Amino acid sequence: MRLVIIGGVAAGATAAARARRLDENAEITILEKGPYVSFANCGLPYRISGDIQKRGHLILQTAEGFFARYRVNVMLNTEAIGIDRQNKNVRVRTKDGESEVPYDKLILAQGGSPIRPQIEGLDSPNVFNLWTIPDTDKIEAFIKEHEPKHAIVVGGGFIGLEAAEAFQKRGISTTIVELMNQLMPPADPEFGTQIAEALAEHGVDSITGKSVVRIGWNARTATLNDGSTLPADIILLAVGVRPNLELAKQAGLEIGSSGGLVVDEFLRTSDPEIYAAGDMIEVIRKPDGAKVRIPLAGPANRQGRIAATNALGGSMTYSGALGTSVVKVMDYTFSMTGLSEKAAAAAKIDARAVTIHKAHHATYYPGYEDLSLKIVYRKEDGKVLGAQAFGKEGVEKRIDVLAVAVYAGLTLQNVAELDLSYAPPYSSANDPMQMASFAALNDMQGFSKFVSAQEAIALIKQGSAKVLDVRTYVEYLNGHIKDSMHIPLDELRDRIEEIPDENLLIVSKAGFEGHLAYRQLSQHGRNAIRYITGGYMSLRLLKEAQNIIEEGE
């Protein structure tokens, strides 16, 4: 068996190691265009920041090491330029010229490449990508030689956020410029705001809804599409990744509607002798079955393992991915899985979302931090579709549990009943995930109905609802919705007669007190009422709320 793997990072390296464990006699060859095999590209920003001090720690395996341990022939600096499917060979180009590498089975694991947007001056010497170890080396050399004072990061996704933190840690004043109207565009807007606020706490500026159109190397500036300019000694591009499909297209392999290479459940391409894995393929998004691209390291590694197994005669299946991800934002963490609320809407799913802001562990134990958690679920049956969380502690723990819930098709009722570990330093007797599930179930059952912050803003702007604020006097004075009625929760029972029997939205600090107020009012004959899930904390995070909020003095 001659197994050839094109691409030697993530999926490709995993595939090679798996193949050797399955077949000691197979002839396994990796063709890698770059100078390194099996390096930790997810660690590159942390090399720039100085968190990873030794460059060698990013190199997980060398060509020599691969051969010594696995007897895998790694051909570095070798570009695959053509596939002859009929004769089953790959044409490659090296510094010594062109040649052919025969195969019995072929695995494509070429990943993706960073997108380079149309910007005047893009070829300036202070413009970089952050995708490979040589990219990191170039950035390091530039910083040492030029000692930049101001950095621009173009793009506010995962790499952009990590790069911004890296520059800031190096003492470089940093601004993120994001074309969309929020940072972390896959997330719901309120989380983009929280991420921006976390960055601002540490001196990183964010500009959203704008783009860089011109780079001036001599002036060390970047010009935005509104004509404004920013100082820019160093610029990092992080606007997204495109799949490397030139070779697959040249070979006539089928490309999907998402722009990724089509594979079946066994990760076979439209040619049964060719498999594919990693960032270049189209996969099923498990919550709704849509065909999408999910360029993440976790799925890529698992796909590489499956592709190798099946190329050597196995029958492992890949059912899809959730897009579970996590990113460090200074001393905060953002994590998500499955569908966001806006992704569910785009997929035309009748979905709802519940939001809570709650301590990540028992409040009587020292060191608790606020955790914002949002669960997206199907309205008809409460099936969990996705979740997002933001905070300083316990974020990824909750998202990992909810990723299992989405994968397994669990409902809110299932999450509410989970037997989770509890001790005061780690959680509460009812975990925040369960508190969110309780709230959503109360709404579904009509026991305590809520509206989302977005729905509340729309109703308020339409003038079709009056707002009752049940926060404390201090909380109200620090900022409130204009023209809202204010009665603190602890005074509510004694002032029921002041509350009109009309369409009423109850706003509390974070939602829970709104639920308590709802239950009081509903038992005093007020029926046209709902509370705002996530409360004032969620409202203030939405740009749409800016003209209905009156800031405190």
Image (spheres, grey):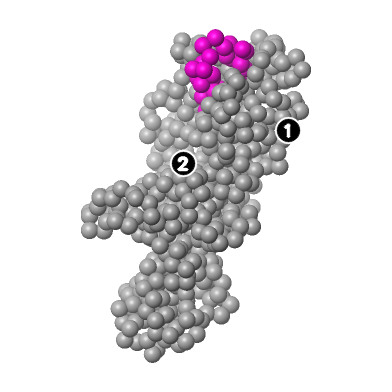
Is 21 colored magenta in this rendering? yes
Disc on the earlier residue, 2 or 1 = 2
- The quadrant where residue 430 appears: bottom left
> What is the spatial separation of the Cα atoms under label 2 and label 1, in whole angstroms?
34 Å
Q: Which residue corresponds to the image point at 45% horizontal and 13% vertical from the top-left? A: 69
Relative to the observer, which residue lies in front, 212 or 386? 386
- Check residue 162 in the rendering and tell me which mark sits there, or answer none: 2
Relative to the observer, which residue lies in front, 154 or 256? 256
Q: Position of residue 479 (x, y in %)?
A: 40, 72
How many numbered discs, if any? 2
Q: Nearer the viewer, mark 2 or mark 1?
A: 1
In the depicted structure, whether residue 60 falls above or below residue 162: above
Q: Position of residue 152 (x, y in %)?
A: 52, 44
Q: Amino acid at mark 2?
A: Glu
Q: Which residue is mark 1?
A: 254
Q: Which residue corresponds to the image point at 53% horizontal and 43% vertical from the top-left? A: 323
**In the image, which residues are magenta?**
1-29
Q: Which residue corresponds to the image point at 36% horizontal and 73% vertical from the top-left? A: 516
In which quadrant will I find the N terminus? top right
